[in-house]
Image: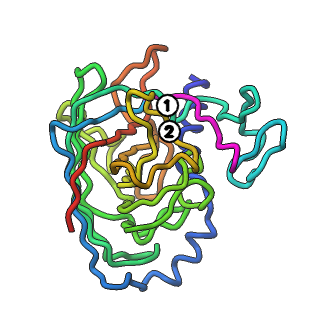
Amino acid sequence: MKGRKTLIIALAAAVMVVSTAAAAVAHSRSNRTVIGAPNNVRMVAPKDGDVRWILPGVRKLDPAIFGTPSTGALRTDLIPEDMRAVDGDVYTTPGPTPFSDNSASIEGHARVKVKDVTSVSGTTTQDKINAKFEFTSPDGSIEYTVVVKNALPEIPDHENFGGVGVNALQHGGTGIGTPLMPQLMAFVAFWGPADLYVNGELQNGGEGRQRFVHFMLSERVRSSVDDGYTLAFDDQVDPEGTLQAHLILPPVALTATGPTGNPVPTGFILPNGAEQPFLHIMYDTVKVSR
């Protein structure tokens, strides 16, 4: 039980790196809007497209950002040295994360419609989200539906552009999002409360709760399936490749008093007998319109 709790906390920490300063500054800027607002974007991932389920696994840390055991640790502000493991001359995460190179093919489709009006996080937002994601478990025995109808005006760990951001650099060393992902251009990104249905039953983690969800439509950050579907380092991100859509539900529930650690009730049992406590789904076939 203790080991499972530690895994859940580690997964949550990998996705949500706490930085209250960003949220505090955001309150004074919450009335700003983007140029040319509203900025509307639609994305569809068709039923016959390529969809991948990301399994837990260790994430290697980019030597260009984090250094190596032989040259010394870098950017310990992003990932402290005592939160790293060593694999040869490469730093890795000490345990499994939602950002591994392990994946499985699944069936699924999605539709996303966003309106970007508010430029920075704050107490209110004019940003809008209308999104629905449907997919199966790797063995095909479980069907999932994730519905997002509202934007979170702010989150406690970093700037979130009022809930919806268009054309913004994220991840890597930017301080926006987990540094376990490479720095990328997110052509669309949103953060919101979601309703999760597992085999048709609402599974939000308790009364009055919703799941925390993050979505991105980005330049390509994973190799082809034939090349292992590996997650890139910064210098391997492919701005000329096909776009990829990322849906992640970390082990975090949204409550009236704020976000709290809470495993996603996926019902999907891993080979070690544990239930996978997060969802990370990749849509590799997408169509975008404005």
Q: Tell me if residue 139 comes above or below residue 26 in the rendering.
A: above
Q: How is the image coloured?
A: rainbow
Identify whether 224 is placed above or below 139.
below
Quadrant position of residue 137? top left
Q: CA distance from mark 1 to mark 2?
A: 6 Å
Quadrant where the C terminus lies? bottom left
The kind of secondary structure element at disc 1 is loop
User: Number of marks in the image?
Assistant: 2
174 with respect to 263 (left or right) = right
Between 137 and 268, the one lying in front of the other is 137
**Would residue 270 be counted in the magenta stretch?**
no
Earlier residue among tags 1 and 2: 1
Residue at the (39%, 34%) spot, across then down: 224
Circles 1 and 2, Cβ within 8 Å, touching? The answer is: yes
Residue 233: quadrant of the picture: top right
The residue where tag 1 is placed is 101
Identify the residue at image location x=61%, y=65%: 20
Residue at 49%, 56% (x, y): give it.
184
Q: Would you call the spot at circle 2 few (<14 residues within 10 Å), some (14-19), or many (20 or more)?
A: many
- The tag on residue 231 is 2
Q: Crowding near pointer 1: few (<14 within 10 Å), some, many (20+)?
A: some
- The residue at the point 62 percent across, 35 percent down is 60
Residue 52, placed above or below residue 206: above
Range of the magenta residues? 55-64
Kind of residue at badge 2: Leu
Q: Position of residue 229 (x, y in %)?
A: 43, 32
Image quadrant occupied by the N terminus: top right
